[in-house]
Structures are given as C-alpha cells and as structure tokens.
Amino acid sequence: MTSTVVYKGLLRTELTHLQSGTVIENDAPTDNKGKGERFSPSDMLATS
C-alpha cells in the first residue's frame, strides 16, 4: 500500500502518501454537488 484515503465529509477526501507523509485534499466539483475548493479526482487524473 502506498497511500491512505480518508473521507472527510461533504464530498471531500484526504489522501496521504505513506512514504513521504504528503497530504492532498480532493473535492468533488460543484457540478457534482461538491465544494469545488480543491482539485477534483478527475482534475488530478488529467494532470497526471
């Protein structure tokens, strides 16, 4: 396992990379009833 994902509520998740401890938060986009305040999972996929 390389990461953990914790659901924070309101369609936000917190992803932690286990080796480095880097933390990233994701939000669902507003068109999917999310806050849109962070990268969405699809944004991150497209960026990668």
Image (cartoon, rainbow, N blue to C red):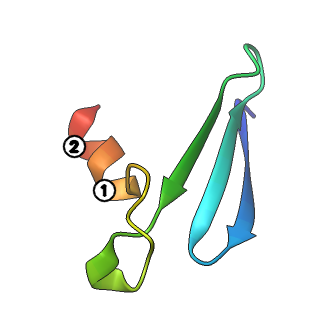
- Residue 32: image x %, image y %? 34, 83
For the image shown, how many numbered marks are present on the structure? Answer: 2
Q: Element type at marker 2?
A: helix
- Residue drawn at (43%, 51%), measured in percent from left and top? 38
Question: Mark 2 belongs to which amino acid?
Answer: Ala
- Residue drawn at (59%, 65%), measured in percent from left and top? 12
| Vertical position of residue 13 compared to residue 15: above or below | below
Binning the other alpha carbons within 10 Å of mark 2 as few (below 14), some (14 to 19) or many (20 upward) gives few
| Vertical position of residue 27 compared to residue 5: above or below | below
The answer to which of 4 and 1 lies nearer the viewer is: 4
Binning the other alpha carbons within 10 Å of mark 1 as few (below 14), some (14 to 19) or many (20 upward) gives few
Relative placement, left or right, of 9 versus 27 is right
- Residue drawn at (30%, 56%), measured in percent from left and top? 42
Q: Residue 42 carries which label?
A: 1
Residue named by callout 2: 46
Relative placement, left or right, of 11 versus 4 is left
Q: Split into 4 quadrants, where in the image is the C terminus? A: top left
| Vertical position of residue 9 compared to residue 45: above or below | below
Q: Split into 4 quadrants, where in the image is the N terminus? A: top right
Relative placement, left or right, of 46 versus 29 is left
- Residue drawn at (32%, 76%), measured in percent from left and top? 30
Report which quarter residue 37 is drawn in: bottom left
Question: Mark 1 belongs to which amino acid?
Answer: Ser
Q: Do the CB atoms of the residues marked 2 and 1 lie less than 8 Å apart?
A: yes
The answer to which of 37 and 13 lies nearer the viewer is: 37
| Vertical position of residue 32 compared to residue 48: above or below | below
- Residue 9: image x %, image y %? 70, 75
Relative placement, left or right, of 31 versus 11 is left
